[in-house]
Amino acid sequence: MRKKIVAGNWKMNMDLNEGLKLAGSIDKYFRENPSGKTEVILCTPFIHLAGASEILKHGKVALGAQNCASEASGAYTGEVSAWMIKSTGAEYVIIGHSERRTYYHEDDKLLYAKTILALNSGLKVIFCCGEVLSEREASSHFLIVKRQLEEGLFILSEKQMDSIVIAYEPVWAIGTGLTATPEQAQEMHKYIRDLVKEKYGNDCAKKIPILYGGSCKPSNAAEIFSNPDVDGGLIGGAALKKEDFTAIVKAIQ
Ligand code: PGA
């Protein structure tokens, strides 16, 4: 049985107090209502990590960052390294989110460098891929996702793939209220799993969690999660409200 995962991506929202308050209430909720076999992760802004780590320390909710530097350490003003993230107690880092690819021009080569640094620091990576609307309309979505995975991820060894979670996020569905239909999600997730199988074999393909992201909310989560190749979600907007986020976790259980 593959692990189910629901990860909240807080993006650049909430000041420190607001963020720690939300982390505290989510932690409390899952202490009282254990998520069973579903792993719950909060991916917070950098400044929340140390405080959130303290709050989540003895509970069941895991912690992650949303990005890391492409260099290990040194004179890179303003950057935060994978190792620094690890030292807060965080276990995960999101790499390759479409907002990083688009607004900060992060390409496949750079994302691969970040992925390697994250893995070498002992972090697990939630590696995002997904096409923009024009690519889907031109029916090139499979090719785009294939390229993103081949160039950014499939250079890893099979052993390293044990620390990877893939998140398929069609860019046209992120924050837009548009969601991929369950059929579209399943079709792409199966395609991704087949690519992993081709490259790393059946065991790896069977084990790797593939999450869906893009306007996932309590009202559509159960239907999306019911697909055989959808192992959970990467949740943006709906992760900012305890009620919505916990309802989405419930939808997968
Ligand atoms: P959304 O964001 O749920 O707000 O669409 C998902 C994401 O970008 O990870």
Image (cartoon, grey):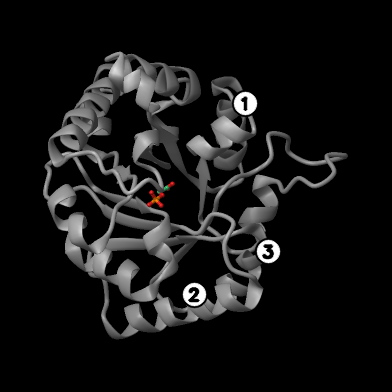
Q: Which of the marked residues, 2 or 1, is nearer the chain's N terminus?
A: 2
* Position of residue 130 measured from the top left corner of the image (x, y, whole percent): 38, 30
Q: Which of the marked residues, 3 or 1, is nearer the chain's N terminus?
A: 3
* Position of residue 99 measured from the top left corner of the image (x, y, whole percent): 53, 39
**At x 61% / y 65%, what residue is drawn?**
49
Q: Which of the marked residues, 2 or 3, is nearer the chain's N terminus?
A: 2
Whether residue 231 sits left or right of residue 171 in the image: it is: left
Looking at the image, which is closer to me, 102 or 211? 102
* Position of residue 190 measured from the top left corner of the image (x, y, whole percent): 18, 29
Distance (Cα) linking label 2 and label 3: 13 Å
Whether residue 118 sits left or right of residue 98 in the image: it is: right
Question: Badge 3 local density, few (<14 within 10 Å), some, or many (20+)?
Answer: few
Q: Is label 3 in a helix, a strand or a loop?
A: helix
Is residue 199 shown to the viewer in this render?
Answer: no
Please, is residue 241 above or below residue 96 in the view? below
Which mark is on residue 23? 2
**At x 44% / y 37%, what residue is drawn?**
127
Looking at numbered disc 1 in the image, what kind of residue is underneath it?
Leu
Which mark is on residue 128? none
Q: Where is mark 3, residue-wise? A: 47
Distance (Cα) linking label 3 and label 1: 23 Å
Whether label 3 touches label 1, CB < 8 Å: no
Which residue lies most toward the right here? 75
Question: Badge 2 local density, few (<14 within 10 Å), some, or many (20+)?
Answer: many
Is the residue indicated by label 2 positioned so its CB lies within 8 Å of ligand 1? no
Which picture quadrant has residue 13? bottom right
Distance (Cα) linking label 2 and label 1: 31 Å
Which mark is on residue 110? 1
Q: Is label 2 in a helix, a strand or a loop?
A: helix
**At x 64% / y 70%, what residue is drawn?**
15
Whether residue 49 sits left or right of residue 7 in the image: it is: right
